[in-house]
């Protein structure tokens, strides 16, 4: 069972930046897809960004040009995915969940964008 642990959430003012990290452990093989989803209060969980093992990325339209996803695959049993979030907006406020294929989820980290 892949274990995912997120970090890097917090409170930031509009226009600010945060960097989320997710470490995948207990895995002998690099998950094909890793990424981030988010869930705001009263809303469904939605895709933010994903990245495949060969570096192919997908972004939600709402974050294109502001967020960048990247990953490290070189360690044998520990894989890391990052989400650099710039120009944050209040509507980015949500719990952000790390995902690794086929179906592993982290516990989530809160991101709050508010003045």
Image (cartoon, grey):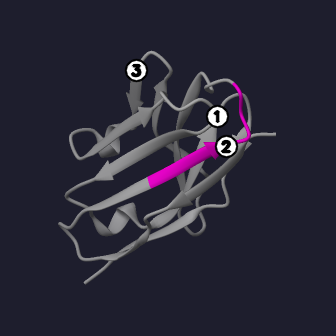
Q: Main secondary structure of the magenta part?
A: strand
Q: Quadrant of residue 72?
A: top left
Q: Earlier in the sequence, mark 2 or mark 3?
A: 2
Q: Secondary structure at mark 1?
A: loop
Q: Residue furthest bottom?
A: 115
Q: Position of residue 95 (x, y in %)?
A: 54, 64
Position of 6 relative to 13 (above/below): above
**Residue pointed to by mark 2:** 25
Position of 6 relative to 79 (above/below): below
**Residue pointed to by mark 1:** 77
Q: CA distance from mark 2 to mark 3?
A: 20 Å
| Residue 26 sits inside the magenta stretch | yes
Q: Are the residues flagged by discs 1 and 2 in contact, CB closer than 8 Å?
A: yes
Q: Position of residue 88 (x, y in %)?
A: 26, 62
Discs 2/3, front: 2
User: Which circle marks residue 55 in the picture?
Assistant: 3
| Residue 16 sits inside the magenta stretch | no
Q: Nearer the viewer, residue 92 or 81?
A: 81
Residue 67 horizontal side relative to residue 111, left or right: left
Q: Quick one: quadrant of the C terminus?
A: bottom left
């Amino acid at each position: 069972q892949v274990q995912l642990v997120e970090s890097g959430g917090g409170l930031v003012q509009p226009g600010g930046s945060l960097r989320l990290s997710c470490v995948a452990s207990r895995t002998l093989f690099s998950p094909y897809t890793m990424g981030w989803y988010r869930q705001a209060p009263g809303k469904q969980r939605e895709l933010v960004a994903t990245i495949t093992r060969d570096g192919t990325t997908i972004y939600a339209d709402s974050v294109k040009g502001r967020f960048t996803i990247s990953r490290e695959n070189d360690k044998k049993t520990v894989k890391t995915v990052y989400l650099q979030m710039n120009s944050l907006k209040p509507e980015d406020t949500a719990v952000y969940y790390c995902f690794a294929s086929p179906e592993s989820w982290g516990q989530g980290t809160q991101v709050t964008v508010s003045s």
